[in-house]
Image: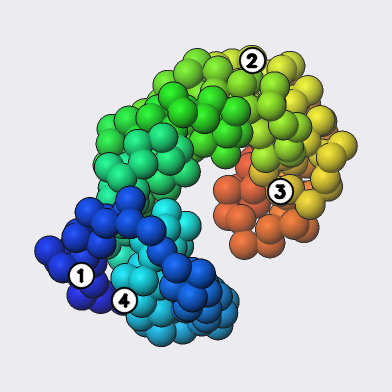
């Protein structure tokens, strides 16, 4: 859905010129009421009403939290240009606001601009090197570039911060493309040990086993991936290919 640019207006900018202004308790309460109302509208996917409430909150009290929420709503609406304006305002008013760089990275990713996306993920990393979600964002950009060494490096850092099945599965994908099949299988095993509901873990493990010639085991992994994701044509094709290879061996 295409929406008009709500915040690319000169009237919006002066709000931030008064960021040092002292606000009364009543101002704070009124702004917070608009903010809470906006969040309720957002949860109900009433985005236009949420935007209206947030603009009111920002006019009363220009808090970073409100501007970030506005950018987030635009992002969820796929109005990426508007989201970029909101998040860039935050980077100018508060350069250390790491989460704004993180969201800018995803905005540019959705626009297909990998270079800009990676640049903003790196900016987030400068201010918040322990943000494991940001490291995943960086890994996604390296995956698109085919730089699997850098992709794996990002996931090594992410896993040193937090253990998640998604991180193991993502690192396994990089290892598959680097020909590191044993490491890929090990990471898939770790992901499956955390949760058996992740089809990519079974799929990636199947790819590694197939590459090593273990067609029967690989077919079982692809079957499990299909149970979790019945629409996966890739898993079905891989399973059928393994069964064909097994038949040829007999």
Which mark sits nearer the N-terminus, 2 or 1? 1
Give x and y (percent) for residue 165.
74, 38
Where is residue 32? Give x, y as percent. Answer: 52, 72
User: x, y (%) of residue 2?
Assistant: 25, 74
- Mark 3 in CB contact with mark 4 (< 8 angstroms): no
On residue 199, the disc is: 3
- Ranked by sequence position, the earlier of labels 1 and 3 is 1
- Front residue of 111/39: it is 39
- In the image, residue 9 sits, relative to residue 104, either above or below, namely below
Quadrant position of the N terminus in the picture: bottom left
Q: Image point 48% across, 18% down: which residue?
A: 150
Q: Which residue is mark 4?
A: 1
Residue 87 vertical position relative to residue 150 in the rendered view, above or below: below
- Return the residue at label 2: 180
- x 45%, y 68%: residue: 24
Q: Nearer the viewer, mark 3 or mark 4?
A: 4
Instruction: Give the mark toward the camera: 2 or 4.
Output: 4
Mark with earlier residue (2, 3): 2
Side of 219 relative to 68 (left or right): right
Q: Residue furthest right?
A: 193
Mark before the other along the chain sequence, 2 or 4: 4
Instruction: Measure the alpha-carbon separation of dots 1 and 4.
Output: 13 Å
Nearer-the-camera pick, 71 or 194 = 71
Q: Residue at x 52, y 30 (%)?
A: 128
Q: Nearer the viewer, mark 2 or mark 1?
A: 1
Q: Secondary structure at mark 4?
A: loop
Q: Secondary structure at mark 1?
A: loop
Q: Residue 5: which disc?
A: 1
Q: CA distance from mark 1 to mark 3?
A: 39 Å
The front one of 5 and 138 is: 5
Q: Earlier in the sequence, mark 3 or mark 4?
A: 4
């Amino acid at each position: 859905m295409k929406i008009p640019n709500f915040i690319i207006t000169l009237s919006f900018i002066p709000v931030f010129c008064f960021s040092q202004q002292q606000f009364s308790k009543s101002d704070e309460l009124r702004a917070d009421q608009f903010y809470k109302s906006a969040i309720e509208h957002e949860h109900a996917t009433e985005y236009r009403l949420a935007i209206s409430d947030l603009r009111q909150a920002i006019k009363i009290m220009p808090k970073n939290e409100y501007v970030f929420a506005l950018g987030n709503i635009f992002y969820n609406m796929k109005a990426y240009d508007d989201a970029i304006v909101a998040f860039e305002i935050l980077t100018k008013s508060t350069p250390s606001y790491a989460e704004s760089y993180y969201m800018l990275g995803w905005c540019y990713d959705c626009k297909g601009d990998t270079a800009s996306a990676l640049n903003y993920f790196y900016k987030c990393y400068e201010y918040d090197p322990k943000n494991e979600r940001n490291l995943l964002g960086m890994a996604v950009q390296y995956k698109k570039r085919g730089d699997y060494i850098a992709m794996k490096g990002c996931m090594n850092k992410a896993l040193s911060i937090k253990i998640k099945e998604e991180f193991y599965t993502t690192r396994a994908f990089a290892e598959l493309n680097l020909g590191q099949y044993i490491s890929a299988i090990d990471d898939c095993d770790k992901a499956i040990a955390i949760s058996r509901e992740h089809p990519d873990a079974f799929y990636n493990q199947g790819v590694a086993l197939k590459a090593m010639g273990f067609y029967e085991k690989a077919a079982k992994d692809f079957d499990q991936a299909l149970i979790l994701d019945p629409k996966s044509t890739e898993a079905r094709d891989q399973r059928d290919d393994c069964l064909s290879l097994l038949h040829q061996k007999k």
